Image (tube, rainbow, N blue to C red):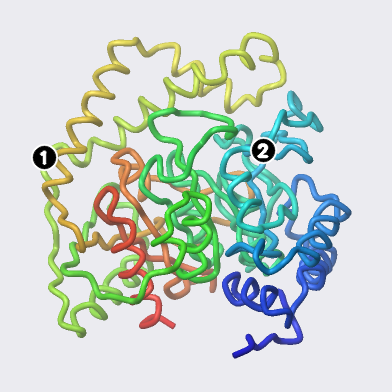
Amino acid sequence: MSTAVTDDPTSLSARVAAAAIREGTLSSRDLVNACLSRVNSRDPSIKAWHFLDPSLPRKEAEARDGAPQAARGVLHGVPVGVKDIVDTVDMPTACNSPIYRDKPARGDASCVTALRQAGGIVLGKTATTEFAAFTPTQTRNPHNPGHTPGGSSSGSAAAVADFQVPLAIGTQTAGSIIRPAAFCGVVGFKPTFGTIDRTGVKPFADALDTVGVFARTVDDAALFAGAMAGWPEMRRGRAPVAPKRVLIVRAPAWERISEESEQAVNAAGRIFEAAGVPVEEAMMPDGFDALNEVHDILHVYEGHRALAYERAQHGESLSQGLRSHFERAEAKSFNTYLAARQTQEAWFQRFDAELEAGEVVLTASAAGEAPEGLEFTGDPAFARTWTLLHLPCITLPQGRGPKNLPLGVQLVGPRWDDLSLLGAARWLAEKLA
């Protein structure tokens, strides 16, 4: 049975597009050209890309179209965006810093190698905040260019939301997948820490940095993440399955939640309840609210260490925001850092006892809709703790805020129970559609 193809290939899901290319009802060349045409018409106002040379993905597309059926992988011929802290051998990795502008990488990052081996095509490098930290890019929210798309994976979220590419790589050290995905109205999936290898990704905080994905469906997110992770059961996609239990967590930083975001969480909770899923208001153990501070210690201290060369040799080329960040780090001792790491380790076990396989946390993805202006990428507080705890997280579009910008709800699962989380997310996404 052939896969139906619309007149606009950019509207296709990645899984449908890959199947159509394998069947011969769509060419990779046509899909890549459609994406490039969309970039050409839309990106002057969105600014999602740091580097894009159309000749490179077109050359790859021609090669994919000429490949024998036996050599066609699960992402065959599908273009993807790669966050510009992730190495690509044929494109520079600038990290939004003048230090590395236009300098080629020594090779592909391991996740890029995996996506190419699965047949994917790197369309270009998506914009990021400086070293995936604080200083914003010029990327704009596709739903309203006067608002931020979030950070640090700004370009990846905006490009997927604007149908410039069906998939994109992001990374999360605090809230850099979940928040921009929510602001831009797409699916953002941060798998369990370490699921996708980080070799070739510019590090910032070794205890926190996690590679994840942006997509427009849960099924596409699973396909892409599973392909890069080498996890066949994830790659094949998960059937929609309601979770065993839902814990609504109104922490940390819940005092900063907007009325509309809280309503989105409550509405999702009612959907679960209507299907007979047990839904409970969870009271987190003592100390949970302090974990954002623990995250901050690790973020500051490890970022200071990771960019030691840049500080020593190119300090004048770093933004004032990053230099101020490093000034805070210099005031922290190794013993302070060690205590934070020990707290993180202790909480792995504590939270493992809170959430069983097949259960999920339901919480907010962000405080509200995307803030106006480009100077502030939004509050990461609603994702930081889950990043610290190495838990898999996914955000789904859910409703709109007072300025008609997207909102999201976040599901969080136990460590390494990513497959159950994806099944629950697909179940909820179908109910929200």
* Residue at the image position 41 percent from the left and 62 percent from the top: 395
Give the total number of marks visible in the rendering. 2
Viewer-nearest residue: 54 or 155: 54
Viewer-nearest residue: 260 or 350: 350
Relative to 243, does residue 319 appear above or below in the rendering? above
Relative side of 102 to 245, left or right: right
Residue 229 at x, y percent in the picture: 47, 49
Quick one: SS at disc 2?
loop
Quick one: SS at disc 1?
loop
Residue 361 at x, y percent in the picture: 24, 59
Relative side of 142 to 413, left or right: right
Whole-number angstrom distance, CA of label 1 to CA of label 2? 44 Å
Residue under circle 1? 286
Viewer-nearest residue: 296 or 99: 99
The answer to which of marks 1 and 2 sits earlier in the sequence is 2
What type is the residue that disc 2 sits on?
Asp
Residue 86 at x, y percent in the picture: 63, 39
Viewer-nearest residue: 128 or 53: 53
What type is the residue that disc 1 sits on?
Asp
Relative to 196, does residue 297 appear above or below in the rendering? above
Residue under circle 2? 108
| Quarter of the image that includes the C terminus | bottom left
Residue 384 at x, y percent in the picture: 36, 43
Residue 422 appearing in the image: yes
Residue 373 appearing in the image: no
